[in-house]
Structures are given as structure tokens and as C-alpha cells.
Image (spheres, rainbow, N blue to C red):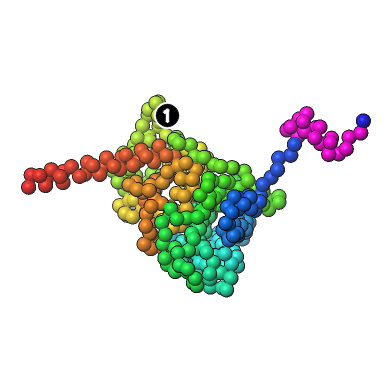
Amino acid sequence: MRFQPGVAFIFLTKLNPMKATKKVITLDEFIFQKEKDFPFATGELSGLLRDIGFAAKIVNREVNKAGLVDILGTTGANNVTGDEVKKLDIFANEQFISALQVSGECCGVASEEMDDYLPINTEASKNAKYVVTLDPLDGSSNIDVNVAIGTIFSIYRRQSFFGPCTMEDFLQRGSRQVAAGYIIYGSSTMMVYTTGNGVSGFTLDPSIGEFCLSHADIKMPEGGKIYSVNQGNFLKFEQPVKEYITYCQSEDKASNRPYSLRYIGSLVGDIHRNLLYGGIFMYPSTRSAMKGKLRLLYECFPMAFIVEQAGGKASDGHRRILDIEPNELHQRSPIYMGSKTMVEKVEEYMKQARITESIPAASATVTA
């Protein structure tokens, strides 16, 4: 008996379903599919996400051959927040801005590497609906030693109506983000993003040059066994933070302690691991950095949005990070984010410290 090719395929698939080929969904296909879920979508946001994905491929190419060309090391300059600028920082910043400038879907960019925001005043862009904030190369101190680094981005709908963008368009609460994501350049390159409806991850397949869906609907475990912090600053931390770290190190079988300390020194790397396995990332204030070190617009807001969309929590120790009203482009904040129960435990220590500190003051008032 002779089978038609199509019939034979169906027959074999029924006998052994594992023989059926799994369809690969690319980033572009995924974005297009999701766009259809929103009847009033006009394509600008989708276009922005594709442009960011394209720029990430170029940066990834240079990261992978960084040791072979003259883009390692420092420029000898410092950025606006005082950090030493790496050569690859500048390259990444230029690539993402270039991609956004030609897209026609973004009216302005603010970057950790620039003193001020950059309006995009082309005819196609000046009335566009969105602005973008960037940390073009997070963890750049790791560049020269071949440790995971990344890019962080955030997209907001502009607040001004027409013409060039304004400062008001960038100084928005994190809760107003319409999309946020990161690209991690590691053993494999991944793009992880959210538009407020869950978190999806895409791995770059170098054989076809496409980001392909590899992690659908990422959910962060509610608890974890990993804490990430620069423990070299322990003596500079506030007392409740010291107490929480001591709690993490203490032995207790009921809560599976002690926890494991894992600290890469790259926000993208540490959050990516904790997003998949559970854990908490902490960058507290210190005596030398009372307002914290990480930037609200470029690091805290986008990563907090992703963590919350995956079921986690993000706090400055006292309040939800995404509810903070920024008042400057390079504003900093302490941050604690990751698995919900772990962040809430830190908040308990911080709250108890405030209560304890308020008791002597109250007693003195009564005595007087």
C-alpha cells in the first residue's frame, strides 16, 4: 500500500508523537501574536521591542569577540554618576540609541551613560508615543573578566502631547511602565521582557540569528534559598539589614537555612538566576551611599516590574519600589527584590527597627 506523503506523516506522528517537530517561536512572531491580543494596538510598542532585540544582537556579537578587538578596558572617563566608563559601555549605548533613533517609534531616550535625556526630533519620531530608559551595559566591571553582563531597558508612554519630549516624560513612577526587560550576555544570550501580562524569555540561536521562545510565562518561586548581596559592605549596612543577613546565615532546618550566598556583581545576572530558582537580591544603603547605589529609572524600576510580573516583590525596605516618584534622571535607591516571602522578611526587620527607634522618643515626650 502506498501512502501519500501527508498521510504518512500523520500516521507516523500518531505512532510516535515525539517524532513531531516542535515549532520554534521567534521573538518577532511572539510579539506579533501578543499584539493581536490587544484590539487597539497600533504596532509602535511592538516595533520598539523588535528594535531593542535587533540592537541586542549587535551588542552580543561584540561582547562575544571583545577579547579579540580593542573594546575591552576603560576609556579613562567617568559617567555622570561617577562610575568608570568601559569602552564596551559606550559601544552598547551607541548601538541602542542608533536603533531607537531610526525606528520612528520613540521620541526620546535617557541612558545611564548620558548626563541628560536625548530627544529624537526627526519628523518620524518627535510625535511618537513612547520614551525609553536604558542601562546599556549593566555589570560592566565584569567585562574584562568574562563574567555575565547585560542590558536593561524600560518603556513609558509619554506624558507630553506633541513635539519634542520633556523631562516629565521620563520622571514617571515605575508603575507606569508599559514594558521592561533585560538582555543577559552569558553562556547563552537571553532577552527577558514583560508588557504587564507575565514574563517571557527568549534565547538567541546563533545558527539562525533569532531570539527564540525558551521560557514561557516565567514564575518566580515564592521562597528561595539564595541571598545576593555585596557582603564586603556588611559593616556599613543598617542594623536591620545586618540582622537579616545573620538570619540568612543561621542554621534552621524548618526554614532550610542557612541560605546560600551567590553574588555575581551584575544586577542582570543575579536577578536572572533568582527569577528562575528563587532568592533575594539586596543592594542596601551604606554609610558611604545613604541613598543607595542603584538607579531608579535604569535599574530598579525595570527589574522590579519584571520581578513583580513573575510573582515576586520589590521594595526599598519600607515601600514598593514601583510607587516611588522620581525627581531626577539619575536618582538612586536602596532595593530588595526577589521571592516574595524573602523580601517580606527583610521588611519585617526594617519595620521592627523603626518601631524600636520610636519608643525612646515617645517616652521622652511623655516625661517632659
Viewed as shown, does residue 274 lie left or right of 287?
right
Tell me: residue 210, above or below residue 277: below
Viewed as shown, does residue 200 lie left or right of 340?
right
6 inside magenta stretch: yes
Name the residue that disc number 1 marks.
256
Tell me: residue 67, above or below residue 278: below
Tell me: residue 247, above or below residue 337: above
Position of the N terminus, as image quadrant, is top right
- In x, y percent, where is residue 112? 46, 61
Q: Is residue 61 visible?
A: yes
Q: Is residue 274 visible?
A: no
Q: Main secondary structure of the magenta part?
A: helix
**Towards the viewer: 130 or 150:** 130
Q: Tag count in the figure?
A: 1
- In x, y percent, where is residue 218? 54, 42
For label 1, the crowd category at 10 Å Cα-Cα, with few meaning under 14, some 14 to 19 and many 20 or more, is few
219 inside magenta stretch: no
Viewed as shown, does residue 311 lie left or right of 203?
left
- In x, y percent, where is residue 337? 42, 45
**Among the 4 quarters of the image, the one containing residue 342:** top left
- Region rendered in magenta: 2-19
Residue at left 51%, top 53%?
180
